[in-house]
Image (cartoon, rainbow, N blue to C red):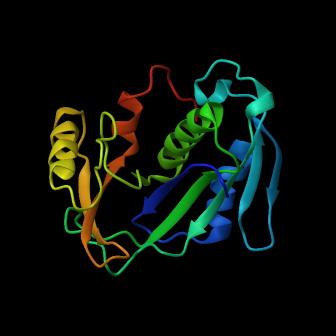
Amino acid sequence: MSGPAVGLWLFEPRGSADIRAAVVPWLENFCDPVETKAGGDVDFCVRDSAPLGLRALDPAGVGVFVLSEDEEIPAGDEDCSAFSQPPVQGLVVGAGCSGPVNHVLLGHLALALARRLDALVDFGGLLSRRPAAGGGTGDEAVPARAGALASELPGNAAEVSYETWGGERWLRHVETWSFCRHGCSTPIST
């Protein structure tokens, strides 16, 4: 996978067959082909973006998307104390290639899938207005700016801390699909 990806967190365990039954028929309404792979991943190409609330997109830049299970969720190093219970399962929605059209489609797909599956959206990092110069894990101002932004937005973005490869603690934002919907300028059809 060389494009962007978004995590979805489930708080009720669901089998692969149950997840596929909830999403494959829906995807088949606007994607072609929709293929279930041997490991349970679902690959699909968006042919009509209207069901996602988007106007027609140039199909030349649109790549393959995949829905797969995230074997790293729940992770033992994450502080999920912001939730009444920790997530029990994770999914990843990823784009096979990068580019503006794939980023936009991924965001709308993640939102619609989170809504269908009653999942939280894991942004994979901190929400921010724009990247700060040198804003790595050693920059204590980055989480403060991200926390301030999250508090200004509708909903309740939770900050989840986790251990980095360097052994430090860092944060990511996780939020409900209803929060994400406020950021979209067009409605989402499910």
Residue shown at the point (30%, 73%) measured from the top left: 78
Residue shown at the point (36%, 28%) measured from the top left: 182
**On-image quarter of the N terminus:** bottom right
Q: Quadrant of residue 54?
A: top right
Furthest residue toward right: 33
Vertical arrangement, residue 77 with respect to residue 32, above or below: below
> Is residue 158 toward the left or the right of residue 90 in the image?
left
Residue 133 at x, y percent in the picture: 30, 43
**On-image quarter of the C terminus:** top right
Vertical arrangement, residue 121 with respect to residue 177, above or below: below
> Is residue 134 toward the left or the right of residue 109 in the image?
left
Residue shown at the point (59%, 68%) measured from the top left: 69
Residue shown at the point (65%, 28%) measured from the top left: 51
Q: Quadrant of residue 103?
A: top right
Residue 116 at x, y percent in the picture: 53, 47
Furthest residue toward front: 134
Depth check: give the residue in front, 61 or 160: 61
Vertical arrangement, residue 32 with respect to residue 173, above or below: above
Q: Quadrant of residue 92?
A: bottom right
